Each structure stands twice: as C-alpha cells, then as structure tokens.
Image (cartoon, grey):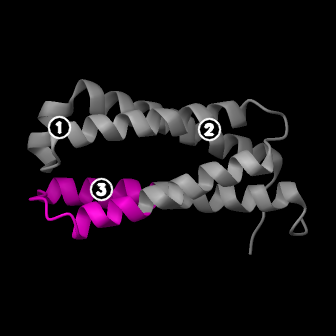
Amino acid sequence: MFTISASTLRRVLWLDAASGLGMGLSHLVLAEPLSGWTGIPAAWLQVAALVVFGAASLAAWLASRAEPPAGGVKLLAAGNFAWVGASLWLAFGAGLPLTALGLGWVLAQALMVLVMAELEWAGALRAQGLVMA
C-alpha cells in the first residue's frame, strides 16, 4: 500500500478533470471521424462524453478543496475503476469491430484511468487516516 499527500492528490484530481474535459470534448466534437477511426459507434462516444463530463466536474470540484473529502474521492475512484471495467468489456466483450487504433485507444485510456483511480483511492485512504503517511 502506498500513500500520497493532499497536494499530490489535488494534482491527480486536476489531471483527471483536465483529461476528462479534453476527452469529452473530443468525443462530442469529433464523434463521427473518431467512430470511423476507432470502430466505436458515434452515439457511444457521445454518451461516454456525457459520463466523462460528470466525472471531470466532480474531479475539478474535489481538486478545488484544500483537503479533498475522502468520500468524494472514493466515489470518483470507484467510478474510474468502473470505467476501466467498461473499457475492457468494450475492447474484448462488446463484439464491436474495433480497429487497431480503436483497441489501442481504449486500452491506453483505460490504463491511464486505472493509474488515476489507484492514486485517488490511496489519497482517499490517507485522508481518512486509514494508512500512516
């Protein structure tokens, strides 16, 4: 088990918010071309953008707190872990004709989200005092 400081947690949360905003905007604005490049239906990309905007908003709100509340950070981390699971299903179980670029994109963003979720979870545990810093 590792721990991270409150300031590092806030940086991770800002990264989560900024990357979510960027991904969400790209999925909304470029849904049709992204669909062709990745094999993911445009409607799925647009729905994913809305989900990501919600998570990014929560991440930004949490990051704006001097001491992000542990419960909110755990909620965000749990959502991120669920996103990773959904990404793996999309990559290997949804039966979509993903292109090589699409498969690479889904797995790369899932890995990034997994890293952020792990860091957020560690930060939430530290904030709760469940581990020694």
Q: Relative to 40, does residue 63 appear above or below in the rendering?
A: above
Give the residue type at disc 2. Ala
Q: Residue at x 73, y 29 (%)?
A: 64
In the displayed structure image, the side of residue 98 where residue 89 appears, left or right: right
- Magenta portion: prevailing SS class: helix
Which residue is label 3 attached to? Answer: 106
Q: Which numbered tag is attached to residue 59?
A: 2
CA–CA distance between discs 2 and 1? 25 Å
Q: Give the quarter of the figure containing the C terminus.
A: bottom right
Where residue 89 sits, quadrant-wise, is bottom left
Closer-to-camera residue (100/71): 71
Residue 35 magenta-drawn?
A: no
Q: Which span is picked out in magenta?
A: 85-112
CA–CA distance between discs 2 and 3? 21 Å
Q: Residue at x 91, y 69 (%)?
A: 132
Number of other residues with Cα within 10 Å of mark 3, as a class: few under 14, some 14 to 19, many 20 or more:
many
CA–CA distance between discs 3 and 1? 14 Å
Where residue 107 sits, quadrant-wise, is bottom left
Give the residue type at disc 3. Val
Q: Which numbered tag is attached to residue 51?
A: none
Which residue is label 1 attached to? Answer: 42
Q: Give the quarter of the figure containing the N terminus.
A: bottom right
Total numbered labels: 3
Residue 45: percent from left, percent from top: 26, 40
Residue 16: percent from left, percent from top: 55, 42
Number of other residues with Cα within 10 Å of mark 1, as a class: few under 14, some 14 to 19, many 20 or more:
some
Q: Earlier in the sequence, mark 3 or mark 1?
A: 1
Closer-to-camera residue (106/8): 106
Q: Relative to 114, does residue 8 appear above or below in the rendering?
A: above
Q: Earlier in the sequence, mark 2 or mark 1?
A: 1
Q: Relative to 119, does residue 22 appear above or below in the rendering?
A: above
